[in-house]
Image (cartoon, grey):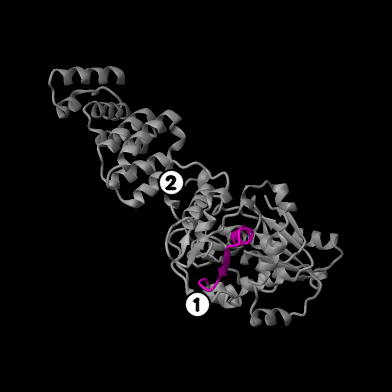
Amino acid sequence: MSVKKAVEEALALKKRGKKLPSILKVIGKDLSAGDKMYTDACVLYNFEKYQECIKQLFDLKIKFDYVDPKLFAFASNQTFINQCKSSFAKEILSFIHEYRKYFGSDDIKIIKQGLAKYKEKNIPRHLIKDIDHLFFQDIESMEESIDFNNIKKKIIINTYYDDSSSGIGDFMRGCCYLSKLFYEHGIKFEIDLSRHTIGAHLERTCHRVHGEIFDTEQYHKDICVATDYIANMKRNLIYKLNEKNRKKTVTIFSNYSDFMNIDKKEKVDFELHGYVKDYMKHRLIFSKPVKDYFKKFKIKDYEVMHFRLGDADILKQEKLELNDSNVNTKTFNVDYQSSLDKIVATILLNGRKNTIILSDSNGLKEYIMKNIPKEYKNFIHCLHAKSEHCSNNPGFIEGRVVKEKEKRDKMFYVALDMYIISKAKHAHSFSVYEWGSGFCYWTSKIFDIPLTLNSLV
């Protein structure tokens, strides 16, 4: 018996007055387990048991990797119209978001019709936001979407903090974008690094008391996929800036920039606005201990080679379970000797200039310290192997335990590396990531350091 015939037989039994439990027992006995489950879902729908139908469809995807978008769309439509609990509505939204590729425009339209009715009732505000988020379109123009009159008398404070999921390079990218945007519209803008451990090693420039941080990257991240990651940040930033309240300050974390949308060649040639460079230089003021520490090495007229080997390399000593399908936590297994060969080749090409080696990988730096060829020891300088990722959970890694004192000590060396780049004659960036190293890139751009971008993969 086919699924179609089984469903037709169930309808015939229903017309003859048979009850649902007895029909589910007798229908589709000879079918495979997957076909039986799907048949049951169809029968439940025909009996107007829409939530039970959806639960069967959830299990069908988990156990047999099968999705019927049409049946799911119609069952969801009726479930929303009949006002299901908000917790179950969230499960439906999460399923649609995760498996969006299965749903065509007609399916989405059917679901939206149900959601429109659902939103008319008294449901939690957070769920309304989730619904709006799931079906929003990307923002074409940030400037047209932001109500600048709403923030004309406010101070926007972009705030870096330890539990953000971004490195300081990403944060600098967001600051560069916002400083230019708000400068052009006459909006007061400040940067606060004091809520992050690295703030102990940079001069404080924001002394305002301000509120809880609204993280534009993490908000709604749980129902985000890679394809709408950037759009989610844009939407969240607009939402917060347009929020109506009497507060004098708007405290956010934002790493968004329209720079994220440009191609590789444009990134190579990209130059910051003069105002932005000046603004950022006056907010990234390194502490006296950082400057004094570097001064004792007496290295002058140097270039920098920065190797970004990825978060998996930085975290491998912690023995965490990392997701290799996530590019942020993917293991690239860069050969340390090949990196040392690149260093030697670059020094030979550039006329044996003083070159300081920086990297997110302590393993690489330890290898270089032990294996520098004797004839290059006067030119290759590796000053420490105490690097640390600025984020407590880079790439949204779960289960990581960070010791605050150790991190505070290691952030000194992150600030030191930034300072070293800011004083270099040239920076050579090598990265396993397609987007390069934000740490090296934005420090170089802010402090007018010539930059060469190189790929390690």
**Sequence-first tag of 2 and 1:** 2
Residue 324 seen from this side: no
Residue 191 seen from this side: yes
Inspect the magenta stretch and tell me whether residue 188 lies in it. Answer: yes
Residue 305 position, x and y percent, is 73, 63
**Rendered position, 56 above or below 1:** below
The residue that mark 1 highlights is 405
Residue 200 position, x and y percent, is 56, 77
Residue 34 left/right relative to 343: left
Residue at 44% in and 37% down: 100
Please state which of residues 16 and 241 is positioned toward the viewer in this rendering.
241
Badge nearest the viewer, 2 or 1: 2
Q: Which residues are magenta?
A: 174-196
Separation of marks 2 and 1 at Cα, in angstroms: 39 Å
Residue 331 position, x and y percent, is 57, 53
Q: Secondary structure at mark 1?
A: helix
Q: Secondary structure at mark 2?
A: helix
Q: What amino acid is labelled 2 in the image?
A: His
Inspect the magenta stretch and tell me whether residue 280 lies in it. Answer: no
Please state which of residues 400 and 394 is positioned toward the viewer in this rendering.
394
Q: How many marks?
A: 2
Residue 440 position, x and y percent, is 68, 62
Please state which of residues 327 and 107 is positioned toward the viewer in this rendering.
107
> Quarter-wise, where is residue 312 in the image?
bottom right
Within 10 angstroms of label 1, few (less than 14), some, or many (20 or more) residues?
few
The residue that mark 2 highlights is 133
Residue 91 left/right relative to 22: right
**Rendered position, 47 above or below 330:** above
